[in-house]
Image: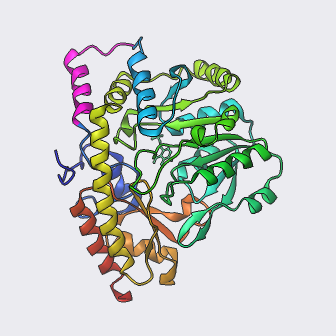
Amino acid sequence: MSFDDIIDRRGTKCGKWDAMEKLFGISPDDGLAMWVADMDFRAADCIIEAGQKLLDHGVFGYQGDYTDYKNAICWWMESRHGWQVDPDHIFTTYGLVNALGVVLQTFTQPDDGIVLFTPVYYSFGKNIAASGRKIVECPLVLENGQYQFDFATYDAQMTGSEKVVILCSPHNPGGRVWTQDELREVAAFCQRHDLLLISDEIHHDLVFSGNKHIPMPVAVPEIRDRLLVFTAPSKTFNLAGNHAGQVTISDPKLRAKFEWMMNALHVSPSIFGTAMTTAAYSAEGAEWVDALVAYIAHNRQTFDAGINAIPGLKSMPMQATYLAWVDFSDTGMDPTEVRERVGKIAKIAADGGVQWGKGGENFLRFNLGCPHSVVEDALKRIQKAFGDLQ
Ligand SMILES: Cc1ncc(COP(=O)(O)O)c(C=O)c1O
């Protein structure tokens, strides 16, 4: 298999292509799906083989032994990220948005404030609102075209009703890999205001050379008594349909509380989720990811060069993820007009900035987890849609 292969996903009931007409009014027949964080690549052979092995066996009963699964996760975290994890500290949820829901039910009460550094992955806000908690937006600041924190402003914003901070590390949609100093500042902020910290590190494997992701428990070991780390193979290996994510908690008190809620809700992983995760977190999986990151780096380079050549458009330099965050503010156009041009003229389904919270209004996010030829096609369409600016 090659990342260049065009795999037609239309008619497979996938959200990315088959729901795009309903959600964006763009037909998948001649449109391009570049929205949700879901790649158009075939999974690594080792993962397909693991799924095939289950199918060949043909018996799909309850699972009773998670040793290989947990050991594979620990091996991956240590070998790829320098983070030693105790297998007994790992919980498996139905993905990480589910994990957030369970965390909010476990550790917070209705109307408690949940801090988000915005713009940020929109399901956080949706989940907080659906849980009857309050979103507290702490806007990131744009400096030299990249996002930075502004803790002096955030300190002044805190009222005492905030209970949790959600950090997206690396950052979706800005593609930032936070530095050791920045992670320390986030941890200090949580300590100052007595906040629990969720570090969502789902994009941690998709980091471009020259940048280094540091897991929060490695960057700031002393924060572990208020830390929950979210990881998953779902972005790295495109396994989101498996609904398997991990919450790692090293503090015994937090862990006991979370375990109680997990038991009460009876959340447990599927056999496909654990088998595919075990297969992914392997030497063969690592080789596939290295090739993937190099491929996305090429997509990023082409996309950024094409976008930045259009007057008024700026693609934020991505240090991580396969998600390009494009700023249309300098076109002087209203965000509705930008969306109309991208959706109706270019026929590209891209995620609109407004749902990402403050600071996202003039941006659109484009998914570059696709064959290079699709990126080239998208660029031609965007160049045409904004042809009058050139
Ligand atoms: C930061 C972040 N967290 C969580 C998710 C979704 O995770 P899941 O599919 O496991 O619910 C995404 C998906 O894009 C994401 O970007």
53 in relation to 223, above or below: above
Q: Is residue 104 visible?
A: no
From the viewer's perspective, tell me whether residue 72 is left or right of residue 118.
left
242 in relation to 314, above or below: above
Front residue of 70 and 16: 70
Q: Position of residue 289 (x, y in %)?
A: 31, 44
Q: Is residue 228 visible?
A: yes
From the viewer's perspective, tell me whether residue 327 is left or right of residue 294.
right
Q: Position of residue 224 (x, y in %)?
A: 66, 34
Front residue of 242 and 222: 222
In magenta stretch: residue 18: no
Residue at 32 percent across and 72 percent down: it is 346
250 in relation to 337, above or below: above
Residue at 54 percent across and 53 percent down: it is 122
Q: Characterize the magenta stretch by its predominant secondary structure.
A: helix
From the viewer's perspective, tell me whether residue 379 is left or right of residue 191.
left
Tally of numbered discs: 0
Q: Which residues are magenta?
A: 45-62
